[in-house]
Image (tube, rainbow, N blue to C red):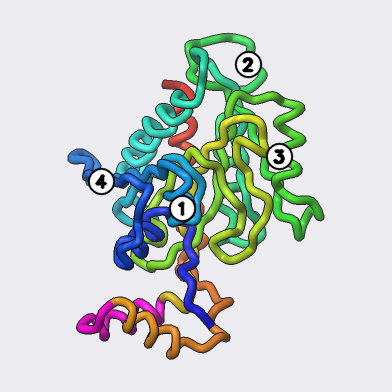
Amino acid sequence: MELKIRTDLALETKESLDEDGRLSGVVFDERTDGETGIKVSRLEILNALGEKNMGRAKGVYYTFETVPLSENDGGYHRKVSEFLASYIRRTIEKHMNRKPPYHILVAGLGNREATPDALGPYVVNNLEITEGIVEDDGRFGFVSAISPGVMAQTGMETAEILRGVTQTMEPDCMLVVDALAARSTTRLANTIQLADTGIMPGSGVGNHRNAINDKNMGVPVIAIGVPTVVDAATIVGDALEGLLDSMDYSRRKQIVRDFIPESMFGMYVTPKDVDETVKRISYTISEAINISMSM
């Protein structure tokens, strides 16, 4: 069986394609913020060639790599929230054709009964719900929110639920929050992805559902996510590749494919302290959204 890179992070897909020398139709740059130490990567898929090479939709993907967010450092979490808020706001503004305030629908995807997948619902729990407030106090946006659950709980596709909500509520924009899968353990709980392309729930773990994007929802869809699980097979693969650095890339990949048993291709690993980690990260993301709406 072919060893496939299972990841929701556009940055990791780009890194793999770069190593293969096959990356076209994409522009990329990165910098480190002097105040927070956050490494910011901006990847933009420009055209159909970029979409084909990356296997992702045309648009902009930001990746923010931080000090591990599992650490109980309230001051640092606040700085991350403020930093992320500025990017949320500018991404929303990019897709609006009028001045604020805007009605923002936040959708917290995932299963609140399974902690590694509960990031979205936890974020919704911590939001300031302001839609319905009559006074215009100069806010950037008014927020309504929903946690649609997962198909195993509702018997309905998440995209279908959200399409019905958007048709009824008519928001200006949707913010979708979801737990992601990474291919590197170093990015668990310290990486945030912000994309203006929407999301396909479960794609990182091979569970493809209908896309939640502007085409299907009828409004701009901005996705925010943090990786909470990593493919077990890629952990073994990365460890082996470290021992095979002297070989060329294609040879290393072949050895890794031959070594990893098929039974590992459906296994995913999450940190042992995932309960506290997801709670802390969800508060950081919700604070970022709250701050961005009141700026």
Extreme residue toward the right, this view: 155
Quadrant into which the C terminus falls = top left
Quickly name the residue at label 3.
Answer: 162
Disc nearer the start of the sequence (1/2)? 2
Left or right of residue 295: residue 244:
left
Callout 1 amino acid: Val
Percent x, y for residue 65? 32, 51
Q: Secondary structure at mark 3?
A: helix
Disc nearer the start of the sequence (4/2)? 4
Disc nearer the start of the sequence (3/1)? 3
Left or right of residue 25: residue 127:
right
Magenta segment:
235-248
Estimate the spatial distance between the alpha carbons at disc 1 and disc 2, rounded to whole Å: 30 Å
Badge 1 crowding class, 10 Å Cα cut-off, few under 14, some 14 to 19, many 20 or more, is many
Quickly name the residue at label 1.
Answer: 226
258 or 170: which is nearer to us?
258
Callout 4 amino acid: Glu
Percent x, y for residue 125? 60, 41
Tags 1 and 2 touching, CB below 8 Å: no
Quickly name the residue at label 2.
Answer: 133
Q: Is residue 47 magenta?
A: no
Q: Secondary structure at mark 1?
A: strand
**Residue depicted at x 52% and y 61%:** 275
**Residue depicted at x 30% and y 63%:** 21
- Mark number, residue 46: none
Disc nearer the start of the sequence (1/4)? 4
Left or right of residue 7: residue 31:
left
Percent x, y for residue 145? 64, 34
Tags 1 and 4 touching, CB below 8 Å: no
Estimate the spatial distance between the alpha carbons at disc 4 and disc 2, rounded to whole Å: 39 Å
Callout 2 amino acid: Ile
Quickly name the residue at label 4.
Answer: 30
